[in-house]
């Protein structure tokens, strides 16, 4: 699903292969990769990042709407600051998960909250009834973002990804 969604400071847009170098600073960073899904390994070089982006771009049209993966760009200078996704959670693929990843040197500036709020609002306008975010219990940054978004804590589970996770839920207001 093609998307260009502006916020006050950011633009949420489709990934491009030319984003590979900047995306590597996010998805190649150990401090980001350690919090992603268990099978995720830090991307180690530009060619590998380009392959990941190519796979995301190619998969996009086949995802169940409004699922997708998007780049988050700072409007003031065009700098890629992060990525977002809406995807179906395993194992039953019924619940939509909201994910965010921000370049580590830009943590603490509100980009994850701003972009996540915008994509959540957009998803609800597409008819989604609820979104979930899951985080490892010691991922304080992700838990803080979920709370800033107004997500309610619904408990812990090992249902998703085969590991103990905190589960947060958001519904349209």
Image (tube, rainbow, N blue to C red):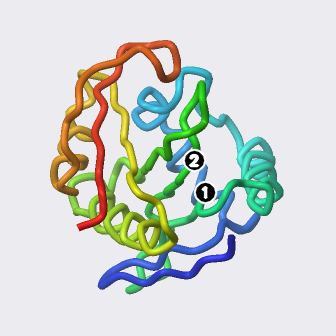
Quick one: label 2 or label 1, which is nearer the N terminus? Answer: 1
Q: Residues within 10 Å of mark 2 (few under 14, many from 20)?
A: many
Q: Secondary structure at mark 2?
A: strand
Depth check, front residue: 35 or 88: 88
**Label at residue 52:** none
127 lies above or below 167: below
Tell me where residue 52 appears, x and y as whole percent: 74, 46
Residue 55 screen position, x and y as percent: 80, 49
Give the Cα separation between the discs numbered 2 and 1.
5 Å
Q: Is residue 36 above or below residue 54?
A: above
Percent across and percent down for residue 173 are 23, 67
The residue indicated by pointer 2 is: 87
Res. 114 image quadrant: bottom left
| Label 1 CA crowd tier, 10 Å (few <14, some 14–19, many 20+) | some
Which residue does the numbered mark 1 point to in the structure image? 67
Quadrant of the drawing holding the N terminus: bottom right
Q: Report the label total.
A: 2
Instruction: Give the camera-side residue of 15 and 106.
Output: 15
Q: Residue at x 38, y 52 (%)?
A: 130
Would you say 58 lies left or right of 63 here?
Answer: right
Query: Going by the image, does 35 lie left or right of 8?
Result: right
- Residue 153, percent across and down? 19, 36
> In which quadrant of the rendered view does residue 133 lie?
top left
């Amino acid at each position: 699903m093609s998307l260009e969604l502006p916020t006050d400071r950011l633009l949420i847009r489709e990934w491009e292969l030319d984003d590979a170098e900047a995306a590597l600073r996010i998805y190649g960073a150990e401090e980001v990769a350690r919090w992603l899904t268990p099978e995720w390994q830090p991307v180690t070089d530009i060619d590998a990042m380009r392959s990941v982006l190519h796979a995301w771009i190619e998969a996009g049209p086949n995802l169940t709407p409004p699922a997708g993966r998007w780049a988050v760009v700072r409007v003031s200078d065009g700098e890629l600051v992060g990525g977002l996704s809406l995807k179906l959670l395993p194992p039953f693929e019924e619940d939509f998960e909201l994910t965010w990843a921000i370049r580590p040197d830009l943590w603490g500036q509100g980009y994850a909250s701003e972009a996540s709020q915008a994509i959540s609002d957009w998803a609800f306008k597409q008819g989604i009834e609820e979104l979930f975010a899951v985080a490892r219990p010691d991922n304080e940054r992700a838990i803080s973002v979920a709370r800033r978004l107004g997500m309610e804590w619904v408990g812990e589970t090992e249902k998703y990804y085969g590991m103990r996770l905190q589960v947060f839920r958001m519904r349209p207001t």
